[in-house]
Image: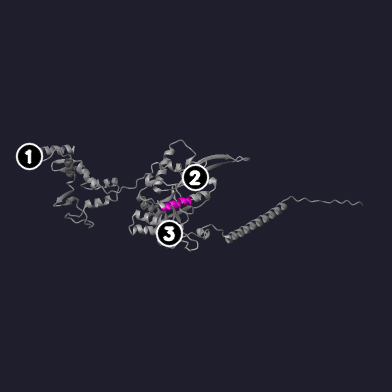
């Protein structure tokens, strides 16, 4: 309607000999929008300023009651940042100048766009609130909120050293409830008060650091190992002979891959959602546990695309490992391959997002995480820089292991203790007779201790059995003949 009114007005101006265009639709629509906002702002030369009614400073002749030099419009705009849209609309409906839905301009009553523009400006920064919905998608803001929430908690060790007044600052809420039971207690004695304290009982730095690096390095080939979940191959109920009991036998695999945790979580959630709509099947992916990083002692397994020399060395090492494994471990008879299992949930993952089922290329010590974070946060290292640093370090370490000479001493940080102890000068495995003898003697001592304990308990059981046997008395009756 406004658009048609604007065209009619332009036709009148054109009939009066004014130079106007009736074919430029964009310019006509912009003219309609400009007319909707022209009561809020005006142009002063090259600057655009708010109109007098909508300025932030108080310009009325009478002083304000509280002495605050802010106009009514500025206070209303400021309050809207802390109120939801519905609350803001309710507040504006009580303020003069924001009630009417019809704006008078001379003799003409204009409704619609000017009113909408005014209320849109004064509710643009309203508090949006928290959307109460479940989402499987990962957002970087979610990780930041989790980190901030964790940092806002006081460590348990520090909290125990605070005085009572300081401890009260960390009390978030107090739960009160009444005891249940048959005990006859007074109202005061049956009341239980449980304070909710913002404390943290474990150090989650390593998890959040790996989580940050996982997202920051998503464009590189560096991936951390993730436990996707458990896949059930077969589930059967077996009867125990001679009893009325039954037991469930489950054959399942713990599936581990290399990839981004957020992407893996989304892929598994989508797959599980599809499977829940299908007929129930006892085999397949288990819903729980959720995907999580794998930590081995103080290390996290990683995989990265290495150079050709390192790749050949890795293949030689894998071939040797396969030969050392028993034959029953080399084949997966009657089971789906790990590749087929993972492909069920990762059909759409391609390129660098493709999930890898390879063995770990290396173990990244968690002690090195602060150094990587320093390179990123302080030195401004890019994901490619971090990837190159780790690649160079792996190549350097591989060359040292490859060219290791047992006759040349090397620190434990470069050559593992197992490699030093099991390698002779000729590069052959050797037997540590002294260590083996010590282990045998220790095993013999443990066995003798167990045998002595068994013999002692056996004798004690025999004594108890004799003590519990029924006592029989024999009476001799002697008859004397007189």
Residue 293 appears at what percent x and percent y?
A: 44, 51
Residue 166 appears at what percent x and percent y?
A: 40, 61
Q: Which residues are magenta?
A: 309-318
* Left or right of residue 420, residue 40 in this image: left
Relative depth, front residue between 51 and 189: 51
> Going from the N terminus, do you reach mark 2 or mark 1 first?
1
Tag 1 secondary structure: loop
Whole-angstrom CA distance, mark 2 to mark 1, is 85 Å
* Left or right of residue 267, residue 470 in this image: right
Colour scheme in use: one colour
Relative depth, front residue between 225 and 96: 225
The numbered dot on residue 367 is 3
> Going from the N terminus, do you reach mark 1 or mark 3 first?
1
> Going from the N terminus, do you reach mark 3 or mark 2 first?
2
Q: Quadrant of residue 240?
A: top right
Whole-angstrom CA distance, mark 1 to mark 3, is 81 Å
Residue for badge 1: 17
Residue 250 appears at what percent x and percent y?
A: 53, 42
- Do the residues bearing badges 1 and 3 touch, measured as CB atoms within 8 Å? no
The numbered dot on residue 385 is none
């Amino acid at each position: 309607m406004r658009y048609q009114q604007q065209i009619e007005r332009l036709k009148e101006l054109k009939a009066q000999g004014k130079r106007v265009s009736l074919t430029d639709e964009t310019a006509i629509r912009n003219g309609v929008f400009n007319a909707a906002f022209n009561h809020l702002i005006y142009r002063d030369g090259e600057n655009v300023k708010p109109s007098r009614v909508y300025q932030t400073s108080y310009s009325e002749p009478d002083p304000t009651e509280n002495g605050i030099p802010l106009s009514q419009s500025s206070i209303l705009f400021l309050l809207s940042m802390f109120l939801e849209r519905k609350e803001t609309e309710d507040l504006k409906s009580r303020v003069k100048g924001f009630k009417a839905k019809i704006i008078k301009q001379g003799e003409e009553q204009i409704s619609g766009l000017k009113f909408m523009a005014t209320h849109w400006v004064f509710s643009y920064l309203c508090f949006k609130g928290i959307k109460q919905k479940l989402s499987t998608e990962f957002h970087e803001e979610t990780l930041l909120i989790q980190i901030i929430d964790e940092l806002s908690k006081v460590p348990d060790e520090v909290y125990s050293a605070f005085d009572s007044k300081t401890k009260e600052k960390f009390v978030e809420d107090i739960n009160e409830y009444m005891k249940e039971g048959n005990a006859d207690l007074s109202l005061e004695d049956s009341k239980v008060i449980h304070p909710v304290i913002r404390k943290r009982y474990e150090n989650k730095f390593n998890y959040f650091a790996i989580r940050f690096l996982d997202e920051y390095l998503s464009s590189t080939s560096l991936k951390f190992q993730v436990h996707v979940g458990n896949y059930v191959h077969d589930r059967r109920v077996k009867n125990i002979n001679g009893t009325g009991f039954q037991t469930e036998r489950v054959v399942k695999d713990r599936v581990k891959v290399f990839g981004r945790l957020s992407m893996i979580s989304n892929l598994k959630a989508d797959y599980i959602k599809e499977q829940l709509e299908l007929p129930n099947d006892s085999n397949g992916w288990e819903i729980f546990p959720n995907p999580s990083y794998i930590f081995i002692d103080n290390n996290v397994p990683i995989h990265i695309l290495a150079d050709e020399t390192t790749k050949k060395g890795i293949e030689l090492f894998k071939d040797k490992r396969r030969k050392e494994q028993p034959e029953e471990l080399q084949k997966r008879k009657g089971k789906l391959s790990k590749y087929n299992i993972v492909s069920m949930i990762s059909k759409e993952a391609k390129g660098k997002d493709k999930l890898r089922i390879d063995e770990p290329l290396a173990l990244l010590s968690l002690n090195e995480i602060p150094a990587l974070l320093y390179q990123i946060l302080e030195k401004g290292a890019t994901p490619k820089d971090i990837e190159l640093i780790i690649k160079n370090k792996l190549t350097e370490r591989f060359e040292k292991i490859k060219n290791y000479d047992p006759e040349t001493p090397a620190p434990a940080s470069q050559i593992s203790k197992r490699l030093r102890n099991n390698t002779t000068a000729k590069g052959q495995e050797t037997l540590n007779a002294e260590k083996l003898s010590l282990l045998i003697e220790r095993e013999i001592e443990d066995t003798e201790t167990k045998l002595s304990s068994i013999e002692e308990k056996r004798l004690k059981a025999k004594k108890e059995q004799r003590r519990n046997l029924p006592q029989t008395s024999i009476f001799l009756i002697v008859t004397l003949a007189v």
